[in-house]
Amino acid sequence: MVYMRIDRGKFWGWVIVAGLIGLLLGAGFTYLLGGSEREQLALLQGRLAAASATASATADLQTQLQSAEASVTSLAAQNSHLASDLAAAQAAPKSSSSSSSSSSTGTVSFISRDVQPSSITTTGTMTLIVKLRGHPSSVKMRVVGLSGVSFDQTYSLGHSSTSGTTQTWKATVHAPTEKGDYRFYATAYVGSHSFAMPGVSAWMFEVD
């Protein structure tokens, strides 16, 4: 039998070389695997940044949408109020350019019209008051609802008192049953002739 004798120095040299090759291969695999993980981490970070930017943009759009909706609601309310005021003005009796009106049968000069008390509830009463100069045969006050309030009622006033040349006409009636704003108009009659006290915007009361 033949035995091959390996030199001890060469043997340990091969062992060392094999170990170094193993270390190099392990380091190479570790680097390759580490590079793949770094790429995945960078990809995930990019996706997270894109998602954050999208969420921020969505929040901004929602804020802008809410602001636009609030503006539309405010404009709609203003438009409704203006439309009600216009309707009330168109429904008002045709008035003279001054507070003094005359005809062949007499003269009427308005001093004031008023609704009392200043704070009116839906279950209370209110007093309609018109002061004027002259000798009307009758006096009426018309009350019209505003801003979506459906109310249009004309009341006949009675002669309450006379002080010098000033006459006071009054009527106490039930307040409207719907809360809101109301305008009121005064008209005096001398025979078949009617005279409306001019002015619209300042003559208003509120029912709470």
Image (cartoon, helix red, strand yellow):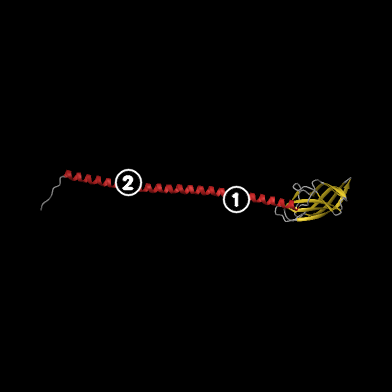
**Residue 38 percent location from the top left of the image:** 37, 46
Residue furthest to the left in view is 1
Q: Amino acid at mark 2?
A: Tyr
* Residue in view at x 39 percent, y 49 percent: 40
Q: Is residue 66 left or right of residue 95?
A: left
Q: Amino acid at mark 1?
A: Glu
* Residue in view at x 23 percent, y 46 percent: 18
Discs 2, 1 touching: Cβ within 8 Å = no
Q: Nearer the viewer, residue 39 or 111?
A: 111
**Residue 155 percent location from the top left of the image:** 81, 55
Residue on which disc 1 sits:
69
SS class of the residue under badge 2? helix
**Residue 153 percent location from the top left of the image:** 77, 56
Q: Sequence order check: which comes first, mark 2 or mark 1?
A: 2
Picture disc at residue 31: 2
* Residue in view at x 49 percent, y 49 percent: 54
Residue 207 visible somewhere in the drawing: no
SS class of the residue under badge 1? helix
Label 1 environment density (alpha carbons within 10 Å; few <14, some 14–19, many ≥20):
few
**Residue 4 percent location from the top left of the image:** 13, 49
Residue 61 visible somewhere in the drawing: yes
Residue furthest to the right in view is 164
The Cα atoms of the two marked residues, 2 and 1, are separated by 57 Å
